[in-house]
Amino acid sequence: MSKDKPAASAAWRARNKARVWMLVGSLILVGIDLAVKAVVELQLREGQTIEGGLVDLRLHFNPGVAFSFGADLPPIVILLGTGAIIAGLAWFLLASAETLGRLGLIGGAMILGGALGNFLDRLAGGGVVDYLHVSWFSTFNLADVFVSVGVGLLILETLFSTRGRTPEPRDS
């Protein structure tokens, strides 16, 4: 019986290593996102623009979700809706973590980090702080970049991963 305990403990650690890595990575990204938002809020007034060439800095508070959808809804509806989506997303990503490769784990951490960063920002009131602006697109933030790149990495993982695939039988 005592011989099985270390083996079970090692198996548990191996199974959860990916989950821990994804959670720690996402928390680091949350910290980076919230720190950048705080600096931008200290340096810019709403609507003020600092031209940067391809990407300008322009402070904007988004009370809605992506592209300001739902901006007219009560803030509690936005909070509850996004909270439920993030909880479901976190459950799915963490449940899938041990089957993901490196790209998928990084993508999952980026999605969770970006989603949590915007959610925590929204909890502070006044909407999500957006500050990256290009002339042909909506104003967005680093958390949005994390989510978008994370989704792209998960798609690449899905398209190119060989994990769990069985080779097709060859004709003899």
Image (cartoon, rainbow, N blue to C red):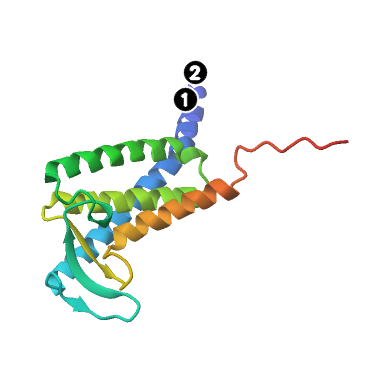
Q: Which residue is mark 1?
A: 5
Give the amino acid at mark 2. Answer: Met
Residue toward you, 14 or 49: 49
Q: Secondary structure at mark 1?
A: helix
Outermost residue on the top side: it is 1
Q: Which residue: 21% across, 64% down?
A: 37
Residue 117 position (above or below residue 79): below
Instruction: Residue 86: give x, y in percent of width and height.
Output: 29, 42
The Cα–Cα distance between marks 2 and 1, rounded to whole angstroms, is 7 Å
Q: Which residue is mark 2?
A: 1
Bin the neighbour count of mark 2 within 10 Å (Cα to Cα): few under 14, some 14-19, many 20 and up.
few
In the rendered structure, the answer to whether residue 132 lies left or right of residue 101 reads: left
Q: Which residue: 45% across, 48% down?
A: 105
Residue toward you, 102 or 137: 137
In the rendered structure, the answer to whether residue 135 lies left or right of residue 170 reads: left
Any part of residue 56 in sight: yes
CB under 8 Å between discs 2 and 1: yes
Give the amino acid at mark 1. Answer: Lys
Q: Which residue: 48% across, 29% down?
A: 6
